[in-house]
Image (cartoon, rainbow, N blue to C red):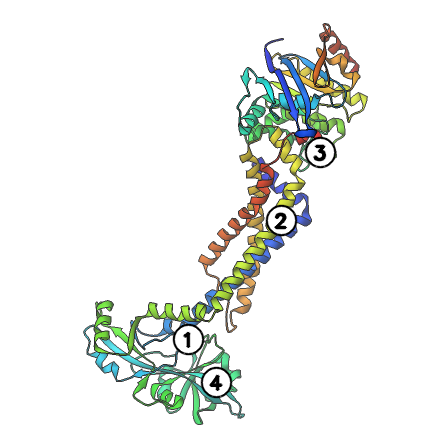
Amino acid sequence: MSDPVIEAIDVAKVLGHGPAEVHALKGISLAIKGGELALLMGPSGSGKTTLLSILGCMLTPTSGTVRVRGRSTEGATPEDLARLRRDNVGFVFQTYHLFPTLNATDNVRLALDLREEHVKGAVARAKDALARVGLSHKMRSYPRELSSGEQQRVAIARAIVADASVILADEPTAALDGENGRAIMTILSTVARDTARGVLVVTHDPRLLPFADRIVHLEDGRIVREEHTATHAQSRAQAAEQSE
Amino acid sequence: MPLILKLAFRNLIHDRLRFIATLIGIVVSIVLVTVQLGLYLGFERMVTTMIDHASADLWIVPQGTKCFEDPSLLDARKQFRARAVDGVAETAAVVLGFADWRMPGGSITPVFVVGSDLRSRGLLPWNLVEGDVEALATPNAIAVDRSYFRTLGITGLDASAEIRRQRVRVVAATNGIRSFTMTPYVFMSIDRARAYIGISPDEATYILVRLAPGADPRAVRRQLLANMSDVEVLTSSEFRGRSRSFWLFGTGAGAALLGGALLGLTVGTVIVALTLYSNTKEHLIEFATSRAMGSSSRYIHKVIICQALISAAIGFCIAKVIDDAIVTMTASSPLPIIITSNLTVSLFVLTILMCIASATAAIMKVTRIDPVIVFAR
């Protein structure tokens, strides 16, 4: 594993005002390194999504620092943050959030179009990304024509097509059956083999544990436990074998 | 096709019913604006059609004349003083006025008499389709537009009727010389016109002045004004402007037409704004996803603007087909709708601007979008 691709240093986040004020994060420090697949686990309301939003540069912390590839986000404008996301972060959402009006290739191509990578080269890269998630035969299909597992694979292709440094996945298997869930995690763990790319997965699903290099437990806005799975490579291989 | 254009188009046609509503809004608005402005242009042209076809560089008109149809009179002998001015090549007196036309059956309708000196080509009928101008020199001869035959109770050439209880005979017919007042123009010699209107041989409505080649109109005008009292000297362009100003704005007709156009534009803007806004609201989660993926605000604004432009282009094309049909249908009406190429270009630009303005609310909506909502859904 290499240097952190993204890190939170003593990050706190207060949501709401007055009586509705909630201390969602209380001094979190977490770094995701290249070549690492980390799971972020915890009960509902523990602050997982808030932490994911802050690491993904969508939300600014009340205090503390976020660094993306070593660059602090402090003082960044919304447009600066959007640029940081575009250049460094790929998202995978629980409900996929594919564009219903675009086919699979165009959904993936959109991530490149946002970076002003247009037409031919972009189409080839989008098709390549879809091939990497095993959807060569569904490139022209619209989201409504795809199964849940296939839609999530398109979402992963969209997240990886622009060579993001970090993939942030929010409950990527929550809406999938066991088989599809394993297939998705196999793809994400394959992505994390690249030492330039880290993957952070927010999940409640214990079936994902074998895929993790590290498991971070969050409770009441604090990291309460971290587990480094020393045999992660072996676990991943086994998990991959099972999914096959 | 660029992805941004594809995304905009697909977003639009995703809900076909709403897209049709958007197009109807644009089409109704543009057709309404075109009809109002086309009527305005048609009205403007009809108001000045006599001035446009008169053979004059300068008009000597009674002091305070408001428009071509103004019945004020001046001393016709002033044309002799006008001829003495350096730079004046020729003058012609013109007589105008309302008179009663008695049809062969006995019923009466008003007509607008236009009398001119036949030798000096002052204001003679044009677009003749039957007969000739020279025939107007014969006794009781008149020329009328064939579109008024039925109104005047006549069938064609050689038909007879009475003006001011004096017999008239149709010796020439024109095509397309129509009056916006619905009162038919009747052309004749100046002497007959004086008799029918009931004014003395020394009176006229206008004196038309033709300049000698190379003469300076401003210098001639100064000299004419110095030699005459109680008159104004106008160029054809000034007289046109005065007539237009009187009929279009003095009577409120033009303001009503422009007001109608403005109303059409407002209705169109509101309809397009509402449909674009609701379209944007429906696709909000996609715009939030784009934002989460790192899209710039500009990219999202471009998608919405593209939606507006696609709607504008399709809506304008449909409206153009309808407008062309309306122009054809009204071509022979008393007040034809005129659509010039300049008006077409202006309307296209107006459609684009209207649709872009309509996109403002939708753009404001997405500008406030919080990408974090993608985790909540």
**Residue position marked by numbered label 1 in the rendering:** B127
In the picture, measured across the screen, residue B178 lies left or right of residue A144, that is left
**Residue in view at x 54 percent, y 17 percent:** A71
Q: Distance between the residues labelled 1 and 2?
A: 50 Å
Q: Which amino acid does label 1 sit on?
A: Asn
**How far is mark 3 from mark 4, CA to CA?**
74 Å
User: Is the Cβ of the residue at disc 4 closer than 8 Å to that at disc 2?
Assistant: no
Q: Earlier in the sequence, mark 1 or mark 2?
A: 1
Q: Which mark is residue A143?
A: 3
Residue A113 lies, in percent from the top left, at 57, 31
Residue B117 spot, x, y in % from top left: 32, 83
Q: Which chain carries label 4?
A: B
Mark 2 secondary-structure assignment: helix
Q: Residue B118 or A29: which is nearer the viewer?
A: A29
Residue shown at 67%/30% (left/top)?
A: B374
User: Which amino acid type corresponds to the residue marked 3 in the rendered image?
Assistant: Pro
Q: Are marks 3 and 4 on the same chain?
A: no
Q: Which of marks 1 and 4 is nearer the N terminus?
A: 4
Residue A95 visible here = yes
Q: Which kind of residue does numbered mark 4 sit on? A: Pro
Left or right: where does residue A77 sit relative to residue B55? right
Q: Nearer the viewer, mark 2 or mark 3?
A: 2
How far apart are the alpha carbons under marks 3 and 1? Answer: 67 Å
The residue singled out by tag 4 in the image is B110
Residue carrying label 2: B274
Q: What element carries label 4?
A: strand
Q: Earlier in the sequence, mark 4 or mark 2?
A: 4
Q: Distance between the residues labelled 1 and 4?
A: 23 Å
Q: Residue furthest top?
A: A230
